[in-house]
Every structure is written in structure tokens, then in C-alpha cells.
Image: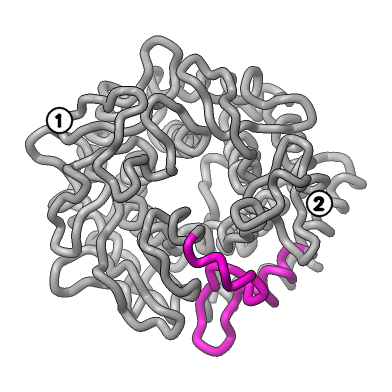
Amino acid sequence: MEVEDIASAARQVLRRHVIAPFVPRCVDREYGGFLVEFDDRWRATGPQEKSLEHAARTTLAFALLERALPGEGFAELVRHGCAFLREAMWDAAHGGFFARVDRAGQPLWQGLKHPHAVTYAAEAFLLATPLLPKGEGPRWADRALQWLDDVAWDRTSGGYWGSYRADNVRFLDGARLPTPDGRDIFGLSPGFKEINSQGDAIEMLTRFEAHCPDPRRAARLQFLVELVADRLVQPRGILPYRYWPDWRPAPDLLRVGYQFLMARHLLLSPAMPRSATALERARELTEFCLVAARHPWGGFCFAVTADGRSWPAIGPQGDLRQWWVQLEAVHTLHLLAHAVKDQCARERYLHARDEQWEFLRSTYLDDKHGGTRELPPDQPRGLGDIFGWLRRAPPRALNLKMHCWKDPSHEIGTLLSLISNAAPDASRGHAARATN
């Protein structure tokens, strides 16, 4: 597909399937913040419990839209989101952001905290700085960064720990958490580390280094990039998901979406201009997915073994083809095609991107009501229980357009990248400008 063609198609998808259905409905005018759950026809539904991930990533996504499409009202949505993060999600007594609150902003899960979405909150305040009163953005970004440094960073082996009590004391290894199933937001017991939080921290620190360099943040970023590139990526481009405290891999399936995400994080990290290592690792991670993680019905699996989509991973958990995994595949393949110098490799990544883009458009986009489906229509309908568990919520119909773990950030990040048509550039973030 020609560059202008995919940019034009992405622009239309952004308008039709993100901005048009979500923006007019998203503001919670009664309690603040954003409404979280919408059914297949974009009707607000459910208790509207609000996760830090949804609140922070939605605010961040609107900040990216404001940069790409200034003057269309996104600035007010950014300010609205920042206000809820400050006034409801932040713990004024002990510091840190609550992982989950009810619709009115009261902490749930006994005030449990987790570093994962704190990275998004820090980015949201950073990008919101021009839209907020002077000093407010940097002040709140620094609060988030300070909590990550002082509370969540492992001073023995490096990287970020998982769940904390309201008083910022880490839960004991193996303890039952005050969540519905006793596990953390990723379904893990305390004592493990996971790749998701580390990858999002790389993205966050990369963005901060581009806007306001700082030696301590640069050291954190360099540690994480080297940890992944030199220690965690296994032969054949395999990136384990779960780890013991000292970063030895713990038994688990490989999560395909995080392979793509980490490839993108490495591509955009400041390490890339200095060394080919980040690009090499990004290609290895992506090649594994292209070779071993495709689903026979199209797109990419949720999880596979180190041997690919083999027997242990074939079934309800591994074969879920969640919307965000498909979007991140498009995003990473697009960036890789612009990053490699070899023409043959570039053409191959462009072909894979176009193939994945067509699968995404034909399978996940709801042309009747707008928006992105959570799963493809041909997904077996007996997966309600397992999918409800995966998103840490009671089982329900698999047709929600939005919920506390499904926000518009994957769509907006990917579509703005396709629209920008630019090579990876950490100083620009996802996109510099998008036109109507």
C-alpha cells in the first residue's frame, strides 16, 4: 500500500472509529474523569469503576490528539483528565496513584497501588504542560516520577516491583491481594516482576529525555534498555513475560503483544542512534512474532510458547486475538519499515504491515456503530469466563467497546503514527501533525 493511501485510510479510521463515537460520550459530567464502560452501541453501561490505566492513558491519548489536531477541543479534555488524576486518583495522605476507584473517585481494593499506569500518568502531565497553569504539569509529573523512584524501584536488582498497599508498603511475596481474585492487575502474585511495566517505563523515560533531559532518568532508562537488550531477550527473539526478583525468567507463556510493544520501545529509545543493538533486538522480537505467533484465522495470538503456537498454547487463553495486539503489530511493523536500511527487509515489513492493517480493518472495525471490537466476530463465544478473568472483571458479553482495561490509546498511537509517515523519532513522540 502506498504511503499516502495508508495515511488517508488511518485518518478516516481515526475520525470514524475513535473521535466520532468516543469523544462526545466520554466525559463523566457527574463525577469527573471519563466514563469507562460502553456497550456495542456506545451506550454507557456497568458500574463505571475507573482504573488508573484508563484515566491516565485516555488523558495521554487526548494530549497526543491535541498536538496532532489543535483547536478541536482536545485541550479541554486533557485538562479534564488531569483534574481527575489529581483530585481522585492521587492519594493525598501517602502519595502515589490508586490503581482503581469507583465512579465517584473513592479508592477500591483497599487503596492498592501499582507502578504500571503511573508511567502513563507521568507522561500525561508532561504532554499536558502547555495546556495547564504554569508549573502544574511539571509538578505533577515529578510527583509521579518521584513515587516510581522512591517506592517502586528495586534498589537491589533494578526495575520496578508490582503491588503496594495504600501506605506504599510492598505486599509480601505470595500474599493475597485485596482484588477480586487476590492477584494484581496482571493476574500475578506479589513477588514476580513482569515485562509490561518495564517496557512502559522505557517509553515514559524516553519521552521525558526528549523533552527535559535529566541524568538520573537517563541512567534509569539506560539500565532498562540494557536489561532488556542484553539480558532478557532470549535466543530467536523470545522475550519472557514473568520474572523472579533477580530477573531470571519464571515459567509462563510469551505474551505476543508485549513482543511488539518492546520492539517499538527499543526502536524509539535514545540507545538506538548510538548502537545497532536496539534495532537488532527490535527486529528479533518482531521476527519471532511473524514466524511463530500468527493465528491461522488471521492476525496474532495473545500468547504462545517459546516454540510458537504449539500445543500448550492452543486454546482459550493463548488464542485470544485481542484488538490491541493487532494494533501494536501494525504500529511496530510500520516503524520497523522506516528504521531498516535494507530495501528487501523494508519491503517485507511493509507487506506484513499492509496485510495486518487489512485484517484489522476488516475484522475489528465496527462499520455500523463505529469503534474497535474487543475480539474478532469469529472468536468462539464460550470464552466469556476466561476473557472476563483476563481483564480483571466479572464475565460478560464480549462486545464492550470500552472498559477499564480498554481505552483509545492503542488506536490513537497507531493511527497517528501511520498518518505522520515519519521515521521513528523519539523527539516527536507518536506523530508531529495530522491533517483533516
| Residue 316, above or below 120 | below
Label of residue 349 in the image: 2
Which residue appears farthest toward the bottom when viewing the image?
A: 368
Nearer to the camera, 15 or 320? 320
Q: Residue at x 60, y 25 (%)?
A: 228
Q: Which quadrant holds residue 170?
A: top left
Q: Residue at x 75, y 30 (%)?
A: 280
User: How much space separates mark 2 and mark 1, taking CA atoms?
Assistant: 47 Å
Three-letter code, disc 2: Tyr
Which residue appears farthest toward the left when viewing the image?
A: 93
| Residue 98, above or below 165 | below
Q: Is residue 133 magenta?
A: no
Q: Is residue 405 visible?
A: yes
| Residue 278, above or below 418 | above
Q: Which badge, 2 or 1, is on the more N-terminal residue?
A: 1
**Residue 395 image offset from top left, x and y in percent:** 41, 65
Q: Is residue 406 left or right of residue 143?
A: right
Q: Is residue 152 left or right of residue 7?
A: left
* Mark 1: few/some/many CA within 10 Å (<14, 14-19, 20+): some
Q: Residue at x 19, y 50 (%)?
A: 108
Q: Secondary structure at mark 2?
A: helix
Q: Residue at x 87, y 52 (%)?
A: 348
The residue beneath circle 1 is 167
Region of the chain picked out in magenta, as a range: 356-385
Marks counted in the figure total 2
Three-letter code, disc 1: Asp
**Residue 26 image offset from top left, x and y in percent:** 31, 73
* Mark 2: few/some/many CA within 10 Å (<14, 14-19, 20+): many
Q: Is residue 183 left or right of residue 337?
A: left
Q: Is residue 67 visible?
A: no
